[in-house]
Amino acid sequence: MNLKDLPKIELHRHLDCSMRFSTMLELLNIDTSSASVKLITLKKKYLIESPHKNLAEVIIKFKVAQELLKGKSILKRLAFECIEDAYYDGIKIIELRYSPDYIKEVNPELSFLEIHEALLEGALLGQAKYKIAFGFIIIIQRTLTVERAQQTMNFALFKNIKIIGVDLADVEDFPALPFLKLFEKASEENLSITIHAGEVPTQKSIENIKEAILQFNVRRIGHGIQSIKSPEICNLIIDKKIPLEICPSSNVLTQGVKTISDHPVKKLWDMGVPITLNTDDPGIFNINLTHEYELVQKIFQFTENDFIKMNKIAFENSFIPKVELQNFNTTFILNT
């Protein structure tokens, strides 16, 4: 099967970690044609292509590439190129999540609204050219104080153009419950909720999945792969029909699993757990969604029909309003 041409939907992609390596080099004013340029050294500095110790170590590495996110023009370009890359990867619908706080760290002069408007402008230009449906999910970082997080949630609740949901992300050692009231407000305001939970191999991580479902009213779970260790949690996910946003390569790079062969994606699928396939941080990981499809097809023998079913799950559980999706060619889902 030609997986590149297979129509796809992606629900879990961090826009602020999606910059092309070629764009990184351009922004660094590096002439790659020069024999003195050692691309291996540059890749080691700016990309993550081999497993790190844990998620926390990966997040620290993100800080290196974060420095390249300075300025409205760069943010606009980032969003446009992300849509363009998605198009050439066979993606028809994409949800892009980003942390206003993360981007503001290197753009202190910009307001959340100015950051959003720059990203929106680039994504809309991409949409006009490539006819891809997209929406933004605003990330609340669980490493922030509740007071800081309140400001970010207030921005999300203002419902600027294309904001379709909110996410609680970052290292799971930081508890989620202090942010519960913020997410209850988001639910009341009809903002869809997804939460990073069950990404790392700890007992707390497994419990975070249950907490997200029963207390945070999530529609989806980011990663959730540690659920395989608890039949109770798997049954809860199946019963509540909560899809997992699974990112296979990412889970290896952050050591959520030791190797791709250890990944529970096939076991979860065979159990009836609803899953979708995603890239997480394709720029810094130097991958695309087709790569993830090919990876799990090779290792676990997923079929084209399996992928079609996963994309139907993604379509049904996308935060983008269905009335908006009607303006795009979604017959690839309806006719399969």
Image (cartoon, helix red, strand yellow):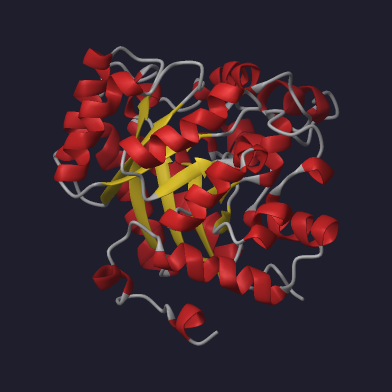
Report whether residue 14 is seen: yes
Q: From this view, report whether residue 41 is shown above or below residue 21.
A: above
Q: Position of residue 14 (x, y in %)?
A: 48, 39
105 left or right of 310 in image: left
* Residue nearer the viewer, 70 or 59: 59
97 left or right of 173 in image: left
* Residue nearer the viewer, 32 or 260: 260
Report whether residue 98 is seen: no
* Residue nearer the viewer, 110 or 102: 102
Q: Which quadrant is home to the N terminus?
A: bottom right
Residue 178: which quarter of the image? top left
Q: Which quadrant is home to the C terminus?
A: bottom right
Residue 40: which quarter of the image? top right
Residue at horizontal 75%, vertical 44%? 263
Q: From this view, report whether residue 86 is shown above or below residue 247.
A: below
Q: From this view, report whether residue 131 is shown above or below residue 218.
A: below
Q: Position of residue 114 (x, y in %)?
A: 23, 33
96 left or right of 266 in image: left
Residue at horizontal 46%, vertical 56%? 239
Residue lying at the far front of the rendered structure? 232
* Residue nearer the viewer, 42 or 155: 155
Q: Position of residue 255 (x, y in %)?
A: 72, 28
